[in-house]
Image (cartoon, rainbow, N blue to C red):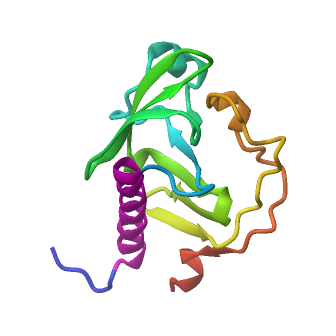
Amino acid sequence: MSSDSIDYGKLMHRAMRSLIQDVLGEVAENGLPGQHHFFITFDTTHEDVELASWLRDRYPEEMTVVIQHWFDKLEVTDAGFSVTLNFGESPEPLYIPYDAIFTFVDPSVEFGLRFESGQDEVEEEYLSEVEPLSEDEEDEEAPLAEDVEPEEEEPRDAEIVSLDSFRK
């Protein structure tokens, strides 16, 4: 199969997923450095996502998890990662493939990635700045997805660069 053009969108998609894999691999090996922590929003309808049925019932389309204070058994592979998180005193194992991820945010350094699916192609947007969370918004206890769901109508000060702006 030959193409008349370079598919930069697909290449960027692969590079950003690889970045997530590298970051999580470092954390699995060495733990979270400093104040780093991650908000990861993913598609719970993705066929390869593994999570408890009560979590799938509670979050039928998407879910945001936090990797911060308490997490266990973080294992990173080429296709995705598994981790055990505590949901209100109930440890639950999860498996999240990279291609199920909608957003990956590290508010401690104002870094984030957002992946959006188009009709026939995948588009990615790089968020060069993400509004930091106030202390009230950070969950000091076990991560609860309901406590970290982003408010979609809240305006952001982040600069968003869409790959569409570079396409002809």
Q: Residue at (36%, 61%) from the top-left corner?
A: 22
Q: Position of residue 16 (x, y in %)?
A: 43, 66
| Magenta residues (range) | 7-30
Q: Position of residue 95 (x, y in %)?
A: 37, 34
Q: Residue at (83%, 50%) from the top-left corner?
A: 134
Q: Quadrant of residue 64?
A: top right
Please determine whether, in this image, residue 133 is positioned above or below residue 147: below
Q: Residue at (84%, 41%) from the top-left corner?
A: 136
Q: Nearer the viewer, residue 127 or 83?
A: 83
* Side of 146 where 87 appears, left or right: left
Q: Is residue 115 magenta?
A: no
Please determine whether, in this image, residue 152 is positioned above or below residue 146: below
Q: Residue at (38%, 57%) from the top-left corner?
A: 26
- Quarter of the picture holding the N terminus: bottom left
Q: Quadrant of residue 107?
A: bottom right
Q: Which secondary structure type mostly characterizes the magenta part of the structure?
A: helix
Q: Quadrant of residue 67?
A: top right
Q: Is residue 10 magenta?
A: yes
Please determine whether, in this image, residue 32 is positioned above or below residue 56: below
Q: Nearer the viewer, residue 79 or 60?
A: 79
Q: Position of residue 116 (x, y in %)?
A: 54, 57
